[in-house]
Image (cartoon, rainbow, N blue to C red):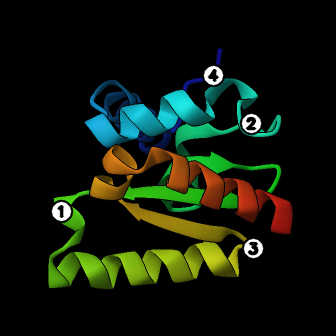
Amino acid sequence: MDELPRFRQSSRKFARAQRQNMTRAETMLWRAVRNHQIDGHGFRRQTPIGPYFADFACLARKIVVEADGRTHKTADAKIKDTDRDAWFRRAGFRVLRFPEELIIGGLPIVIERIRAALRET
């Protein structure tokens, strides 16, 4: 079997590590969207899309769902998130961002917003 290029190997390791070390909110959200539980739509977690990794993505509907924890609240992180979201939009994806506090305290609201976005695409 051909060896993967080094950057692909490190990307796979990064994604695997992220999947194994999910936050509480990410775990809750993953349990709600995995196995086609939202109207039959499939989601992947920590999946590479271009130069980025989406927390969760429905590739068939081109929707990216991000769970934003405290690391996303700094000014530098907000700039990076804005650039990242712009890249996803240019690639045809719709980006949904939810603060982890909302996921933990209001998961049904988050699921309904995801469901609505899936209906709109």
Q: Is residue 99 above or below residue 90?
A: above
Q: Amino acid at mark 3?
A: Gly
Residue 75 placement, left or right of 7: left
Q: Amino acid at mark 2?
A: Gly
Q: CA distance from mark 3 to mark 4?
A: 31 Å
Residue 121 visible (yes or no): no
Mark 1 vs 2, N-terminal side: 2
Q: Secondary structure at mark 4?
A: loop
Mark 2 vs 3, N-terminal side: 2
Q: Which residue is mark 3?
A: 92
Residue found 27% across the figure and 55% down from its top: 101
Q: Amino acid at mark 1?
A: Thr
Q: Is residue 44 above or below residue 70?
A: above
Please identify the quarter of the rendering in which residue 13 is found: top left
Mark 4 vs 1, N-terminal side: 4
Seen from the viewer's position, the closer of residues 109 and 91 is 109
Residue 22 placement, left or right of 52: left
Q: Which residue is mark 4?
A: 2
Q: Which residue is mark 1?
A: 71
| Mark 1 vs 2: CB contact within 8 A | no
Q: CA distance from mark 2 to mark 4?
A: 29 Å
Q: Which residue is mark 2?
A: 42
Residue found 62% across the figure and 29% down from its top: 34
Q: Secondary structure at mark 2?
A: loop
